[in-house]
Image (cartoon, rainbow, N blue to C red):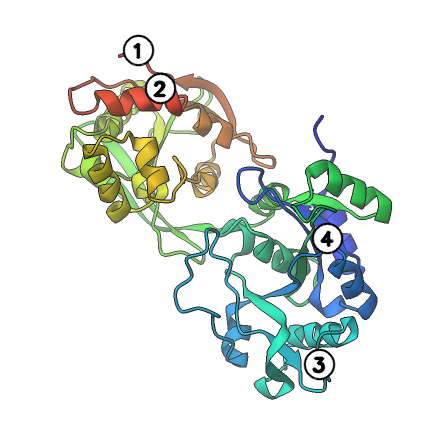
């Protein structure tokens, strides 16, 4: 039975009032729930309650705080699976030992103060600052960023307190267990996915950086290059015709960059074929858009993709190779692409894809984007990509014919 969660505005109101809430993340990530409150609202009673979660008590802060306070990463090379950015632990200078709930709450409130300085703290201490990414959960879907975001959205200092919740056996509390805790203590409970969806509705991260006409062998497109706040990537939209005219929903392709397939016609994948098929199909219909997203190798980057190729040469399939390198089978994110489609004025689309997960990406709450049809885009099979395409069909659920 699905867990009924509170709304993001309800959670923000609770944070604003100094309350503790529970935030859960995806079941395929940590599958964890954290107690979270605003750092500037931390009291001894609040901290004492959060410590009952029995996880590590931390404070998420932005890069400028770490720079001002000379807080450094606790290790030079962070190879933790989720890259949790632990910084120099501190205590308020007036503390005796720093371990009490009262001392930790004082340390936390001081960390949240815009005028705190290095002289306010001693190190090492008992409060662990975590470096949150600028942009919050829209850049990293973690509790560190969620705690910072919720505090900022509540109109408070962008610093949040978080502590993992463990059950009586010392393992991560289950969803049902977290709901029981929330009911027992009258706490609001939301998910990071909800927070992402809410922010994607209320905040725009993209802007048009440049645009021009672009004649191609498939006809005359309009090219629009976007900049993304907090990121160096420059996604592209290739637009054909009037997307907002009445009629059948436009064809749309969300295409992730593939240097080997798109640029040099590699036979190991179907990416280049799909790119050109999509442009041809869009121009033939008279209108549509292709969004080109710079997320090479299903999000793992070019170097890692080539390492995966080497593992495939030794007998692994594409999924096994990604897993052997420490990645999920598909690391791509379509949030920026969805924002681009909204910027282009789209609501209903016919999505050019064989991948049902792309269709699911449109179902994030908050976007007025509706996939009215999933249009197949099946390229020719060759001896080099047959196994790759079969793996896509069998292990990744792509709608492809049997080879």
Distance from label 3 to label 1 (Cα)?
66 Å
Mark earlier in primary sequence (3, 2): 3
Q: Against 326, is 107 above or below?
A: below
Mark-to-mark CA distance, 1 and 4:
49 Å
Q: Residue at x 21, y 41 (%)?
A: 259
Quick check: marks 2 and 1 in contact, CB under 8 Å?
yes
Q: Which residue position is annotated with label 2?
A: 393
SS for callout 4: helix
Mark 4 Cα shell of 10 Å, populated few (<14), some (14-19), many (≥20): many
Q: Position of residue 90 (x, y in %)?
A: 61, 77
Give residue 377's quadrant in the image. Answer: top left
Point out the frontmost of discs 4 and 3.
Answer: 3
Q: Is residue 238 visible?
A: no
Percent position (x, y) of residue 236?
Answer: 33, 43
Does residue 382 sit above or below 235 in this rendering? above
The numbered mark, 1 or 4, whose residue comes first in the sequence reads 4
Viewer-nearest of discs 3 and 2:
3
Secondary element under disc 1, as helix, strand or loop, is loop
Label 4 sits on residue:
12
Depth-wise, is mark 1 or mark 4 nearer the camera? 1
Q: 57 or 4, which lies in front?
A: 57
Residues under labels 2 and 4: Cα distance? 42 Å
Q: Is residue 147 visible?
A: yes
* Sooner in the amino-acid sequence: mark 4 or mark 3: 4
Q: Which residue is mark 3?
A: 97
| Element at label 2 | helix
Please name the residue that numbered disc 1 is placed on: 402
Q: Is residue 50 left or right of residue 227?
A: right
Pick whichever, 204 or 77, lies toward us.
Answer: 77
Could you say which is closer to the camera, residue 83 or residue 65? 83
């Amino acid at each position: 039975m699905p867990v009924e969660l509170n709304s993001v505005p309800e959670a923000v109101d609770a944070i604003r009032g100094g309350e503790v809430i529970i935030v859960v993340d995806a079941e395929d990530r940590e599958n964890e729930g954290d107690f979270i409150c605003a750092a500037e609202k931390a009291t001894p009673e609040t901290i004492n309650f959060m410590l009952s979660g029995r996880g590590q008590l931390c404070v998420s802060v932005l890069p400028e705080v770490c720079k001002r306070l000379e807080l450094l990463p606790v290790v030079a090379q962070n190879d933790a699976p989720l890259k949790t950015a632990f910084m120099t632990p501190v205590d308020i200078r007036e503390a005796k030992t720093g371990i009490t709930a009262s001392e930790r709450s004082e340390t936390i409130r001081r960390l949240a103060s815009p005028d705190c300085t290095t002289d306010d703290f001693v190190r090492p201490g008992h409060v662990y600052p975590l470096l949150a990414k600028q942009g919050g959960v829209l850049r990293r879907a973690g509790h560190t960023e969620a705690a910072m975001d919720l505090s900022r959205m509540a109109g408070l200092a962008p610093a949040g307190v978080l502590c993992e919740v463990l059950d009586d056996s010392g393992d991560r509390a289950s969803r049902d267990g977290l709901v029981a805790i929330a009911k027992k203590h009258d706490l609001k409970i939301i998910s990071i996915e909800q927070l992402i969806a809410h922010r994607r509705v209320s905040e725009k991260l993209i802007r048009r950086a440049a645009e021009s006409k672009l004649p191609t062998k498939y006809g005359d497109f309009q090219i629009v290059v976007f900049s993304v706040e907090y990121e160096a990537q420059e996604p592209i939209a290739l637009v054909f015709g009037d997307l907002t005219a009445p009629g059948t929903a436009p064809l749309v392709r969300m295409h992730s960059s593939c240097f080997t397939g798109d640029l040099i016609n590699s036979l190991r994948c179907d990416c280049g074929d799909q790119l050109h098929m999509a442009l041809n199909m869009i121009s033939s219909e008279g209108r549509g858009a292709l969004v080109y997203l710079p997320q090479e190798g299903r999000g793992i980057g070019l170097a890692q993709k080539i390492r995966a190729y080497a593992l495939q040469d030794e007998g692994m399939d594409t999924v096994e190779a990604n897993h052997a390198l420490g990645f999920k089978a598909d690391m791509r994110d379509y949030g920026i692409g969805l924002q681009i489609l909204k910027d282009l004025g789209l609501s209903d689309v016919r999505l050019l894809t064989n991948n049902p997960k792309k269709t699911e990406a449109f179902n994030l709450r908050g976007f007025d984007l509706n996939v009215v049809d999933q249009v197949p885009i099946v390229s020719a099979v060759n001896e080099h990509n047959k196994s790759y395409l079969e793996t896509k069909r069998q292990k990744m659920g792509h709608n492809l014919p049997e080879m």
